[in-house]
Image (cartoon, rainbow, N blue to C red):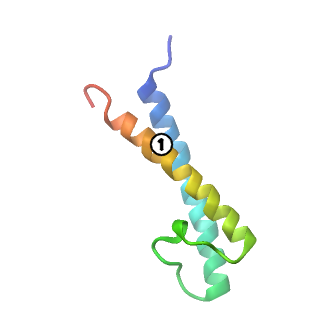
Amino acid sequence: MPISIPLVALTLVMATSFGLLVLGRRYLRAYVQRHGKAPPAMWMFRRAEDPAMEQDRRLALVLLPIFLLAAVIYLARPGG
């Protein structure tokens, strides 16, 4: 049984959603601990001073286009 492209896209959407959730929570906790307030809404697009926070930010920034592309592929499927 061949694996369908929409199924692979949905799997990618779910996996990257979870990854973005985990990375966002880690960044949020580190930012609040360091600055005492919530990070800006566009946190993925602003550099962080802390190397650990910067690593989480960059990884989230890599996952974002994968998530968006997989979501478009899944939602643009025939009959979907």
Query: Is 41 situated left or right of 37 in this image?
Result: left
In the image, farthest residue toward the left: 79
Image quadrant of residue 54?
bottom right
Q: Secondary structure at mark 1?
A: helix
Residue 3 is situated, as x and y percent measured from the top left of the image, at 50, 19
Image quadrant of residue 50?
bottom right
In the image, farthest residue toward the bottom: 36
- Residue shown at 49% from the left, 30% from the top: 8
Image quadrant of residue 30?
bottom right
Residue 21 is situated, as x and y percent measured from the top left of the image, at 54, 58
Front one among 17 and 68: 68
In the image, farthest residue toward the right: 51
Residue 13 is situated, as x and y percent measured from the top left of the image, at 48, 42
Mark 1 burial class by Cα count in 10 Å: few <14, some 14-19, many 20+: many
- Residue shown at 27% from the left, 31% from the top: 80
Give the residue pinned by disc 1. 13
Query: Is 13 situated left or right of 48 in this image?
Result: left
The answer to whether residue 44 is above or below residue 34 is above
- Residue shown at 52% from the left, 67% from the top: 45
> Label 1 sits on what residue type?
Val
Residue 53 is situated, as x and y percent measured from the top left of the image, at 68, 70
Front one among 7 and 59: 59
In the image, farthest residue toward the top: 1
How many badges with numbers are in the image? 1
